[in-house]
Image (spheres, rainbow, N blue to C red):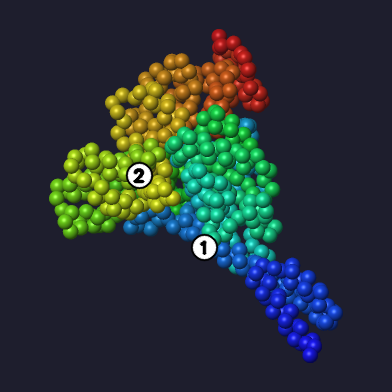
Amino acid sequence: MAPSRHDVDRALLRQVRRALRQGRLMGTFLDAINVADDVSGILTAVIAVVTLLTFYRQSRQAWWRELTGYWNAQFNTGEEDGYPLDAHVPPLLKVYVPRTAKPRADPAADAVATDDLVLQDGPHVLLIGPPGSGKTALVRQAAAASAQRWLTSAGRLGRAPDGPLVIRLTAAALAGRTLQHAIAEAAAPWVPELDQEPLPHRRMVILVDGLDALADPQQRSGVINMLAREAATPPRHRRLVVTTRPLGDKELETLAPFDAYHLMPFTEEDVEALAGRWLSDPDPFVAWLGSDPASAKARSPLLVTVAAVLWENGIHGSAPRPAELMEAFVGLLLGARRTALDALFAGPGDTGPDTEWLSRHRRDLLVAAAKTSVDGKDVVTGTLDWIGEQLPGSRPERWREPVTKLLLRTGIFQNGRRGLVPTWTGLVAYLAADRPAPGLDRNTMTTGMGTPSRQAVVGWQFERAGTPEEFIEEMRAAPGGSTDVGRFAAGGLPVPEPVLVEVLATLLTDGSPEARAVLITLAADRAHLEALRALADDESQPRTVRRAAHLFFAGRAVMSVPPPG
């Protein structure tokens, strides 16, 4: 007995549903056409439309379900304050101040909004900024804001944001792995296809933060080479935006496929904007922050944030000096968590002189952990080794669990793929700088400034040593000293103005690629840029210096000029 038309319709619809579950849309669509002789043309059209709409709906729901967990996690990083304090700290999405950056190849060009560099179409981007300049906050905010926009779309592309799909990674997540593997792990269960659109009519922006945090030179070199290979591909379906502290000349050369930009320092307007978003009465805070000429050094995003946290907690002295701000913040963190930390050393059977010693030396334990982290070693193992040195015969391995919990509960470290990693690299660098050795060694300092993961440590050692002018003068007088001092100034360390002018003049007439690279980095700072412009017009300077300054602003390298004279 031949099947009725109704039976055929029902069978065909069952096929459509089965094909959708198995991903065989096209085969089912062709089956619908093949049985057109058994059903009416109108029914065939209806089945085709229903098939396409159902497939669209289910595919939309698939990527929505797969990415919702990732978006919620990223949004939460922008909603959380990030500090384990008893007092309220506003979330990043509320207080974040939009940033600007200048193209490295043209220091005199107008600054552009970093939001445009991240979200708009364009080439791959390398964002360079000194320690404490807010690179990680920029990445966190961009990922959280993008996630918030996507979550409001409820999986409907018609309501989705115009911008790209933003995926946030750390450089450490790329060590020894492919970009696709790292993205798949970060956004699981969603699996990207890097040679296709990640979502219909959308591109993907991959934010890679903390390239400088890779302390192992070989590991950092491997990640840099991988990023350079990826950036050699035109940004058709995906773009890379990478943040880092200043890198060495060879590393920058390897990353030439990127358009390099320098993150602009915080301005007075930026400080006032952050204070206005954070505090109900910002004027006293802004006045306090500017109450001492030396406090100008405290106006990096890192230190302004620390100052605002302290202000909200009623901790503000006569002048906001950088090292004093950071020390007060560490004390606030430890004090806010004192009850929880005390519990770690109050377990049954753990009383005794070793326990009492560890309880009294929590800050020293944090310093040991920070130094281990900066050296690129396992944080907990390095801290236990330090305990073994301080308490011979104490069997430090038994402290592994309490030490791990202590480091996590302070909020200074968090769990990473290969052990504990810093939550805030700037704070870890401050702790690692702890107490500089008597006297400053030039080789140690210059090597540190040339190592991205140690730049902030050297900066804090200088800060705590009072940045002795005689040391900077001695460094400048040594062979290659102007380049070294230039790197120090580019890293945010204060250099006396007369010394800085002499250094700039020497670098301008040096003619080497290394000197030009340092000049370009220096010119990212407004004060250094104005000093270079002043040299170009200073009649008291030798003609060769003035000519070299004009050529620098014209974007042409000075290949060979005689020394000033």
Question: Along the line of sight, which residue is nearer the eye, 126 or 321?
Answer: 126
200 up-or-down from 217: above or below: below
**Horizontal arrangement in the rendering, residue 38 relative to residue 323 (left or right):** right
Q: Which mark is residue 379?
A: 2
Q: Position of residue 402 (x, y in %)?
A: 27, 53
317 or 238, which lies in front? 238
Q: Residue furthest bottom?
A: 1
Q: Nearer the viewer, residue 492 or 183?
A: 183
Residue found 68% across the figure and 72% down from its top: 19
Which residue is the extreme one toward the left?
352
Query: Which quadrant would residue 347 be assigned to in this image?
Result: bottom left
Q: Quadrant of the N terminus?
A: bottom right
Q: Which mark is residue 471?
A: none
For the question of whether residue 464 can be seen, the reply is: yes
Dot placed on the residue nearer the N-terminal end, 1 or 2: 1
**Residue placed under numbered mark 1 in the picture:** 69
* Label 2 SS: helix
Query: Which residue is located at x 31 percent, y 51 percent?
Result: 404
Q: Position of residue 105 (x, y in %)?
A: 63, 32
Residue 556 location in percent, x, y?
66, 23
Give the Cα separation between the discs numbered 1 and 2: 29 Å
Looking at the picture, which amino acid does disc 2 mark?
Val
Q: Residue at x 48, y 38 (%)?
A: 219
Q: Position of residue 296 (x, y in %)?
A: 43, 36
Total marks shown come to 2
